[in-house]
Amino acid sequence: MKLLNLLILRPPRTLTDLILLLVVFFILLGSQSLFASEGDGVKLAQASSQPSPPPKTRTVVADLLMIDGGFYVVRGERGEIRIEVTPETQLAESFAFGDRIKAVLLPDDKAISITRAQPGEPIGTTNKAPGTSAPPSPPSPGAKTKPSAPPTKVSPNVRIIIADILMGDGNFYISRS
């Protein structure tokens, strides 16, 4: 009969019933947060044990036009590129107008490293996909090695617009489509 009275939900009649109800509520609330944090801790430990893949990068070889604060403006084969130089960027030396530089960039044009380009290096952009986690196997003594493939060139996004040209000003055109 006592168990039946406990299962029936009724408002607390006395102060001790109210205090007992609050204590049980906070114990349940606290135990749920403990179990949730243990599960999150396991997930965090698993996530931290797996190394994150390296970011996708691209290499730009171009002529330096100007240094504008924290940005290097360069002229590549497809036009000007504004490269953000951060305190984490590895600069091989200081550069000036006209220097041909080689910059390794993240997708958001933040520079990882900037060095002077070799004299025979052509102007252009090459993409580098993230590396695989498996280390390369050493070549066997009897096997021939294939020459590595040259880096791929990035093709620009080309759009064809049919429109009436209203005005031209240097490199800018105002058109009506």
Image (cartoon, rainbow, N blue to C red):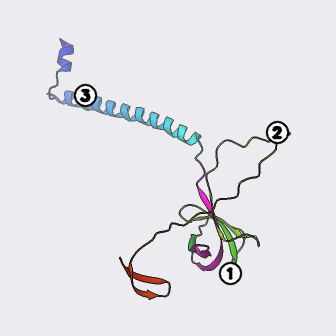
Nearest to N terminus: mark 3 or mark 1: 3
Q: Which mark identifies residue 140?
A: 2
Nearest to N terminus: mark 2 or mark 3: 3
Magenta region: which residues? 53-78
Q: Are marks 3 and 1 in contact (CB under 8 Å)?
A: no
Residue in the picture at 51% in, 40% down = 44
- Quarter of the image that includes the C terminus: bottom left
**CA separation in Å, label 2 and label 3:** 75 Å
How many numbered circles does the render carry? 3
Extreme residue toward the right, this view? 141
Q: Position of residue 144 (x, y in %)?
A: 82, 44
**CA separation in Å, label 3 and label 1:** 80 Å
Around disc 1, counting alpha carbons within 10 Å, would you say few (fewer than 14), some (14 to 19), or many (20 or more)? few
Dominant SS of magenta comes to strand
Q: Is residue 7 above or below residue 96?
A: above
| SS under mark 3 | helix
Q: Which residue is mark 3?
A: 20
Q: Which residue is mark 1?
A: 98
* Quadrant assignment, res 51: top right
